[in-house]
Amino acid sequence: MTDPILSDFLAPGVDADEVPELAALASARPLLDAFITLFRGTEAEVLMRLLVLREIGREADSPRWPPEALRARFTYLDPVKFETVLKRLRDNALLAIGEDGHYALSDIGRNAVAAIAMLLRFGAEEDAELGFLTAQLAGLQAVGGITPEALGHLLSKLNDLTWHFEEAIASGSEFRILDARRRLSANGRWLARGTDLLNTLLADPEVDFDIARIAQRIGLAQSRLARVDAAFQRALNKIEAQRVTLGASGVSSSDVAAWLRSLEAGAISGLAAAAIAAVPELPLLAGGHELLDRAEAQLEGGPPATEADTRLPPPGDARAEVALQSEDLRLLEHFTDRLAALPEPQSLHRVVAGGGFALASYRLSLLALLADGARGGPEDGPEDGPVGTFMRLPVDIEFGDTLTAVGADEIAAITQGEARPRTPAPASAPPVASAPAARA
């Protein structure tokens, strides 16, 4: 039979028994009624019920309270209001009365107080929800009762934290980023505890498939959170590069913003009262005679008395003494002369050595350019200039596939190879195009 209260929320023709999601909640009616009793009414009434219930449950050695002891314990409460609170807790099964008339917490009342106490124990900087969910999972794991629903709550909270931190970074606000970083640091122990729980859970070869799937997704969410701190630092470094220091005072724009954030709205409005105008004050830049001349010209239909000269100024000649910057190719020209005068084949380390590692590397790169130019043909290189002269040198460069030790002139080892001057062909022989055997 459908509950008449639920029927107002269900669609026409739908019975509460046909909604499986309501079954778990309907079976927990006594526990839900306990929380309804605690939190229904004004804020003051809720606080008084929680106060009385927590103080009664705080006494572990003597959990049963005679009425006189209760009245003596709560002397700071109005007697009539106190009796009203006791009656409401007693009528809704949060307090139990024995045959001797002594008060004690019921099982439902103790569970409700324990759940609230766990939520109240978390620090202001921490996420109470994250700590509660992690502690809840630790307890469920200890008794072997972890459910996919409990893991899903933790996954949802981790994704919510990731979204919050990404929003802080995207805002570009130094203060939001610092607040988010403090929040991440405060919850570090819960993230570490959650990692330990997941490792233990996934190490079980008989774990349920749905639980393992959600646990893996939680691991990915925690990995994203572990990388957020580096993203915070990059964002703060970028803000640091844009920070402005006010003269030589040592006060930065961030200090000014932090000071303004510490002020109340009234103080800020007082500072801005003399600095901001709702309508800008435009000074009058024309006198009476100028306005009269303009008005007469407009009335007569003629052009204005004075026309602004909008013509561009005449072009000027560029300074002839400005010389264009040219590249220094003296080292290339000197190396070209050395290769041109090469009397016989020499190894690469003898050809490129001299002046240290930097100059030797430069000469070796020029030899690689010369070898590539020889494979492509002289016509592929530039025609004029020092580079073209170097590319047309009658020298063949051959690179090997191994390294040879040098140990001199800052060179430990170099690619084995040889630079060979080309032998001019006999005058009687027809010219033949030779392909140098160079290996890259």
Image (cartoon, grey):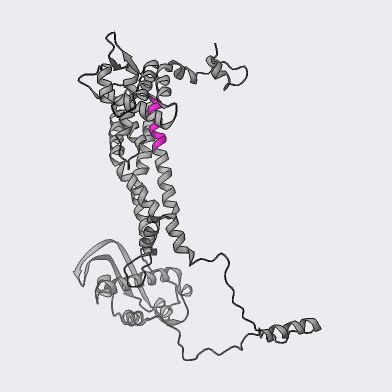
Please name the residue shown 44% across and 82% down the image. 385
Instruction: Please give left or right for residue 133 compared with residue 379 in the image.
Output: left
Residue 225 vs 419, above or below: the answer is above
Residue 363, quarter of the rendered image: bottom left
Residue furthest to the front: 79
| Residue 171, placed above or below residue 224 | below
Q: Is residue 22 left or right of residue 130?
A: right
Q: Which of the pair 407/72 is nearer the observer?
A: 72
Q: Is residue 125 above or below residue 342?
A: above
Residue 409 to residue 139: above or below: below
Task: Residue 390 in the image: state x and y as whole percent.
Answer: 39, 78
Furthest toward the top, the residue is 99
Residue 147 colored in magenta in the image: yes
**Quadrant where the N terminus is found in the figure:** top right
Q: Quadrant of the C terminus?
A: bottom left
Q: Position of residue 98 (x, y in %)?
A: 29, 10
Residue nearest the observer in this picture, 159 or 172 = 172
Q: Quadrant of residue 108?
A: top left
Image quarter of residue 335: bottom left
Q: In terms of depth relative to the viewer, which is nearer, 156 or 121?
A: 121
Magenta segment:
146-157
Residue 142 visible, this angle: no
Identify the residue at image location x=47%, y=63%: 272
Q: Is residue 186 magenta?
A: no
Q: x%, y% of residue 123?
A: 30, 39
